[in-house]
Amino acid sequence: MLFPTLGRVQGLHLAGMLGLILLAWNLNAGRVRLLVGGMDCCRLSHWQALGVVMATEFAISATPGGSGGPPTYGYLLQQHGLTPAHALAIYTVDQLVDMLFFLSALVVIAASNLWAPTNWYAGQQILFLGGLIVLGLAFFVGLVRHYRQLLLFIGRMLRRLGVGARGRRWMMRRILEYRLGLLRVRRFPPSRLWAVYGLCVGHWLLRYSILYLAVREVGGMIDWTYAFLVQMLSLSIGQATLMPGGSGGAEASAGLLLLPHLTAGTAAGAVLIWRFVTFYWYLIAGAPVFALLAGRPAWRGIQRQTTD
């Protein structure tokens, strides 16, 4: 039943979904430009920021648990003049803005479900996802507010691992630079921070509309807010599997969550389209950008080292 279902997909509609992802990448590029521009040390053109976004998305999709995202993001921003600590601070703020959006979205979905109940039960999903986000935010705030204790803890651990005084001082300086980078972002004008959040909202609304559109494309019908929750849950489960891009776990969990509302063939077709647009397309489009921006400079550095 899968192939007849996929036969309903129109190429123009699939191209439109890919266009939504491209638009989402551009919104994310605007967010990167605002964050980097506020550091008063360098400027990115829109195309440079778009390259950073696409290369980072490729690294997230191609590595277990998205572990390649932070180093790629930091490395590319360092190529434009940011220190490693400040690049990591910007990445952290970028992720915190994402978490604030998802927490706000869950609150809105919960309120709308109370005001106009639907035929699906969302309470457990919202509580689970909201709890994860709140725990993540609380953990980060605790680390920032109690950074002195963190420095002492890290210093003791490094000493036990046999790291010398020079190495420990280097690590402490990097952590302090990272904190100063966070404080600098905190002093951004409210208008800049609101603009960053607005671009974040636009990016995720576009990206999280893909599953809803995929279901409609194969002839199914679900509520947009349910599709939103399905994607949040399935991608969280996929990341927990530590497979690149959540492969396997994301597809299986999304399919199971859609089955109560769709036939097996329709659910499978929708998940396949969704994953192509939001995972495989990230690999296909991002690979050449990653190779150009991250691979070529790294290869040149290796060549210089071997020549020396």
Image (cartoon, helix red, strand yellow):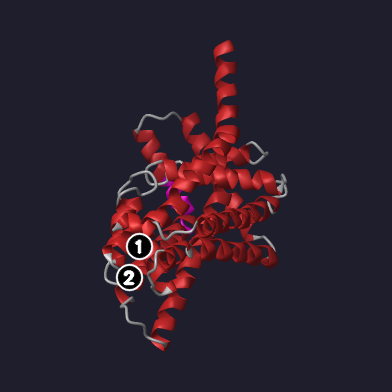
Q: Amino acid at mark 1?
A: Leu
Q: Are marks 1 and 2 in contact (CB under 8 Å)?
A: yes
Residue 190 placement (x, y as % from top left): 67, 67
Q: Residues within 10 Å of mark 2 (few under 14, many from 20)?
A: some
Label 2 sits on residue = 125
Asked where in the image residue 295 lies, by quadrant, the reply is: top right
Identity of the residue drawn at 39% across and 36% down: 158
Q: Position of residue 37 (x, y in %)?
A: 70, 51
Is residue 172 toward the left or the right of residue 116 in the image? Answer: right
Q: Is residue 288 above or below residue 21?
A: above
Which of the 4 image quarters holds residue 111?
bottom left
Tell which circle, 1 or 2, labels the residue nearer the N-terminal end.
2
The quarter of the picture where the N terminus appears is bottom left
**Magenta-drawn segment:** 145-152
Residue placed most toward the observer, 283 or 294: 283
Q: Is residue 53 left or right of residue 128?
A: right
Percent from the top left, x then y, of residue 167? Answer: 48, 31
Q: Nearer the viewer, residue 99 or 25?
A: 25
| Left or right side of 50 for 17 | left
Whether the magenta-drawn stretch holds residue 201 is answered as no
Residue 172 seen by the camera: no
Q: Residue at x 40, y 79 (%)?
A: 110
Compared with residue 144, is residue 283 higher up or lower down, i.e. above or below? Answer: above
Number of marks = 2
Residue where numbered disc 1 is placed: 233
Name the quadrant of the C terminus: top right
The kind of residue on which mark 2 rests is Gln
Q: CA distance from mark 1 to mark 2?
A: 8 Å
Disc 2 is placed on an element classified as: helix
